[in-house]
Image: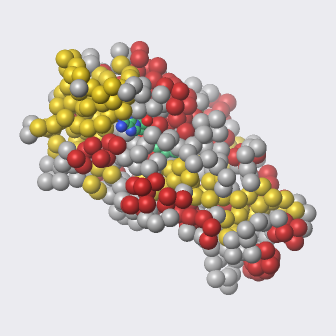
């Protein structure tokens, strides 16, 4: 095996958002930094490239937002109601959604460093904008933001990764594509380098520190079935095919501790006939997130979940699992003409499994693989249970509910009574696994004996202990950026 005589200061495994934040932070002190990317350049950037680029940060008002989006004009500010999303609100959301299992130390760092980290990214040249298109409703000419999610990277995920890549190059960081890290080289003194297969050739690289940012294990059907449980090999992968648990495996072999929600993951409603892995030409448009305005039916023709339990970005990440557990691992989302204007852009792409009907009978007759008789009964029972005296208001949890159904809808319950009717077939799309490596607030990887492994740092999707059961939308990129930056800074000090 070839051995390189060069000693790198920091080798970063992965080339997504967490990896580049680590590399940029490490390069600040003039250190020699190498980024290893398993994918070819055309598919590089991991899941980060597939995102919409939404990033959750705590802010106390528009002055904070201007620190990351200095280009916001007075006119834009005038027509936007950004509200606030305080550190307390972010902490509350993390606690509530993870059923209070999120690691308190890491969560505090995540929340407190969210704004300063994006400000730092901005100082490096990454540009952000307000998420008017996705996270705001136009009310009387003013955009009111909801759900604590206000900022997105310019150009979405592809824009974010392209900009991080070119900033990294400008900062003298070397990037190797088609370079798959295989193992860590370590001894009693800690991690000393990485073994890598680059374009078919195996090499040993020496480095003072290694940052692992190689994503979760969601793209490996065997790991999914082993840890998430039977049936998970049947899920579609929303993002990159390259996140197969390599970083986690390498660290565990070097003595790292596993932690977090190993049987849990982020998974959403996803086009039933989508390909096995994400398609960069479509990005996240296979997702189908407008279910709060309609109803779900499964193959038995039955509703199975409270579509209006909370705002979309507090339920979407756990409903993929619910869909996977339905007969045939699929479901229909049904809407009528009243809410058509409310449907997100992703419903307008060509690659949808869509059925329409001018009557409920006609619509139901087109729902293949489904008990159509029961479906019609279910819709009628649902319509009769809607509390129509409560006004529909998509901007708040309006309390317009159903009563006396075995599964009630808590908010935004609209009757399906205005043709044409539409149904969209969805299955489960897995985004990322929740279980992973144990780190401390310095992003050092902790060994199974409870002490930091010298020279080893980790950030992003492959870290466990932060997300459990559910997830507040837009936190994945922020998490990778916050701990990536910390990992890079500390790795460069070795
Ligand atoms: C469709 C979709 C939409 C999403 N939308 C959002 C959103 O809007 N906001 C948000 O916050 N989150 C979103 N997420 C989640 C988000 O993508 C992740 O939380 C985040 O990108 C993880 O970043 P990361 O850097 O840890 O991993 P990644 O970006 O996945 O990077 C991992 C990298 O490691 C590389 N790699 C893997 N194995 C090896 C190896 N052995 N050697 C070398 N390299 C290796 C991969 O090729 C990749 O470059 C979305 C995810 C998907 C799939």
* Whether residue 425 can be seen here: yes
Residue occupying image coordinates x 35% and y 15%: 172
Q: Nearer the viewer, residue 66 or 350?
A: 350
Q: Nearer the viewer, residue 16 or 401?
A: 16
Residue occupying image coordinates x 25% and y 44%: 251
Left or right of 256: which side holds 133?
right
Q: Nearer the viewer, residue 331 or 391?
A: 331
Residue occupying image coordinates x 25% and y 32%: 194
Left or right of 112: which side holds 133?
right
Q: Quadrant of the N terminus?
A: top left
Residue 155: % across, % down: 59, 30
Residue occupying image coordinates x 27% and y 19%: 32
| Residue 481, picture quadrant | top left
Residue 211: % across, % down: 28, 35
Give above or below for 295 relative to 458.
Answer: below
Q: Quadrant of the C terminus?
A: top left
The residue furthest bottom is: 404
- Which colour style is shown? secondary structure
Q: Nearer the viewer, residue 294 or 325?
A: 325
Left or right of 350: which side holds 449?
left
Give above or below for 487 relative to 88.
Answer: above
Residue 476: % across, % down: 45, 45
| Residue 444, picture quadrant | top left
Residue 265: % across, % down: 45, 57
* Whether residue 338 can be seen here: no
Left or right of 137: which side holds 468?
left
The residue furthest left is: 188
């Amino acid at each position: 095996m070839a051995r390189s005589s060069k000693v790198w200061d920091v080798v970063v495994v992965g080339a997504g958002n967490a990896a580049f934040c680590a590399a940029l932070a490490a390069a600040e002190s003039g250190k020699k930094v190498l980024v290893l990317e398993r994918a070819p350049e055309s598919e590089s950037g991991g899941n980060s490239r597939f995102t919409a680029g939404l990033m959750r940060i705590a802010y106390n008002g528009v002055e904070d937002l201007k620190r990351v989006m200095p280009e916001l004009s007075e006119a834009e500010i005038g027509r936007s109601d950004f509200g606030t999303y305080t550190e307390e609100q972010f902490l509350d959301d993390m606690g509530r959604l993870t059923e209070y299992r999120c690691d308190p130390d890491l969560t505090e760092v995540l929340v407190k460093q969210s704004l300063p980290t994006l400000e730092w990214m901005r100082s490096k040249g990454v540009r952000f904008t307000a998420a008017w298109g996705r996270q705001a409703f136009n009310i009387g000419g003013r955009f009111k933001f909801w759900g604590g999610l206000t900022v997105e990277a310019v150009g979405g995920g592809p824009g974010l990764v392209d900009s991080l890549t070119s900033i990294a190059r400008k900062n003298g960081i070397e990037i190797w594509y088609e370079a798959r890290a295989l193992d860590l080289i370590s001894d009693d003194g800690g991690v000393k380098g990485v073994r890598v297969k680059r374009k078919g050739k195996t090499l040993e690289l020496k480095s003072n520190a290694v940052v692992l940012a190689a994503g979760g294990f969601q793209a490996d059907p065997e790991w999914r079935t082993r840890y998430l449980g039977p049936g998970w090999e049947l899920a579609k992968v929303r993002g990159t095919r390259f996140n197969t648990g390599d970083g986690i495996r390498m660290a565990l072999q070097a003595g790292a501790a596993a932690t977090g929600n190993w049987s849990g993951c982020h998974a959403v409603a996803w086009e039933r006939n989508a390909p096995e892995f994400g398609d960069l030409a479509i990005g996240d448009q296979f997702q189908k997130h407008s279910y709060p305005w309609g109803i779900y039916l499964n193959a038995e023709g039955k509703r199975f979940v409270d579509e209006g339990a909370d705002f979309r970005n507090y339920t979407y990440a756990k409903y993929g699992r619910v869909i996977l557990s339905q007969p045939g691992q699929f479901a229909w989302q049904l809407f009528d003409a009243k809410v058509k204007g409310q449907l997100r852009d992703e419903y307008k792409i060509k690659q949808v499994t869509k059925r329409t009907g001018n009557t409920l009978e006609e619509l139901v007759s087109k729902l293949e693989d489904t008990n159509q008789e029961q479906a019609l009964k279910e819709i009628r029972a649902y319509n009769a249970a809607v509390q129509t005296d409560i006004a529909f208001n998509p901007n708040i949890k309006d309390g317009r509910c159903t009563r006396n159904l075995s599964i009630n809808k808590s908010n935004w319950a609209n009757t399906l009574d205005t043709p044409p009717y539409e149904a969209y077939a969805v299955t489960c799309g897995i985004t990322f696994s929740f279980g992973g490596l144990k780190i401390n607030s310095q992003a050092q990887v902790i060994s199974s004996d409870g002490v930091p492994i010298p020279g080893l740092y980790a950030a992003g999707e492959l870290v466990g202990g932060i997300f459990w059961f559910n997830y507040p939308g837009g936190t994945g990129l922020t998490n990778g950026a916050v701990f990536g930056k910390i990992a890079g800074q500390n790795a460069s000090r070795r």
